[in-house]
Image: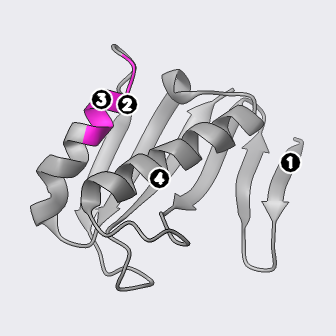
Amino acid sequence: MMIDRFRTGPRMSKIVRCADLIFLAGQTSSGTSLADIAGQTREVLRRIDELLGEAGSDKSRLLSVTIYLRDMDFFGAMNAEWEAWLPENAAPARATVEARMASPDLLVEISVIAAT
């Protein structure tokens, strides 16, 4: 079985493709100055679009998504951005959890598994 890794660094690959599956590392808005959950969510979803395209897929082929929120009070605002971004009839299996983030400035992180 062939495994391809893209944008690989010392700790992780941003994209791993194995057979017809694509795994994305958790995406955050780090490196931006966005301070609100809506802006950070839009930035994360933009990055996911970019990485899926690079791997030969798109958001209509999502299989499973895990969303990490710094605070569950952000759930509604994050969902508003998510629902505006997600194509109709393309909802993946999904979990949303509250988690401590790697940086206090991060409000959301999203990890994706998609089909090619």
Residue 100, placed above or below residue 7: below
Q: Please name which of the two marks, 1 or 4, marks the residue nearer to the observer.
A: 4
21 or 6: nearer the viewer: 6
Residue 89, placed above or below residue 64: above
Q: Which mark is residue 36?
A: none
Which region shows up in magenta? 81-87
Measure the C-alpha gap from mark 4 to mark 2. Answer: 11 Å
Q: Is residue 83 magenta?
A: yes
Disc 2 marks which residue?
A: 85
Disc nearer the start of the sequence (1/2) = 1
Relative to 46, 105 lies left or right:
left
Q: Amino acid at mark 1?
A: Asp
Q: Please name which of the two marks, 3 or 1, marks the residue nearer to the observer.
A: 3
Disc nearer the start of the sequence (4/3) = 4
- Could you say whether the residue bearing mark 4 is in a helix, strand or loop? helix
Measure the C-alpha gap from mark 3 to mark 1. Answer: 31 Å
Q: In the displayed image of the protein, which residue is found farthest to the right?
A: 2
Disc 3 marks which residue?
A: 84
- Image marks 1 and 2: residues in contact by CB distance under 8 Å: no
Image coordinates for residue 98, horizontal then vertical, percent: 23, 69
Q: Which mark is residue 44?
A: 4
Image coordinates for residue 57, horizontal then vertical, percent: 67, 27
**Quadrant occupied by the N terminus:** top right
35 or 80: nearer the viewer: 35
- Image marks 3 and 2: residues in contact by CB distance under 8 Å: yes
Image coordinates for residue 2, horizontal then vertical, percent: 89, 42
Disc nearer the start of the sequence (3/1) = 1
Q: Amino acid at mark 4?
A: Val
Q: Amino acid at mark 3?
A: Ala
Measure the C-alpha gap from mark 4 to mark 3. Answer: 14 Å
Disc 1 marks which residue?
A: 4
Report the residue at 69% width, 32% height from top: 53
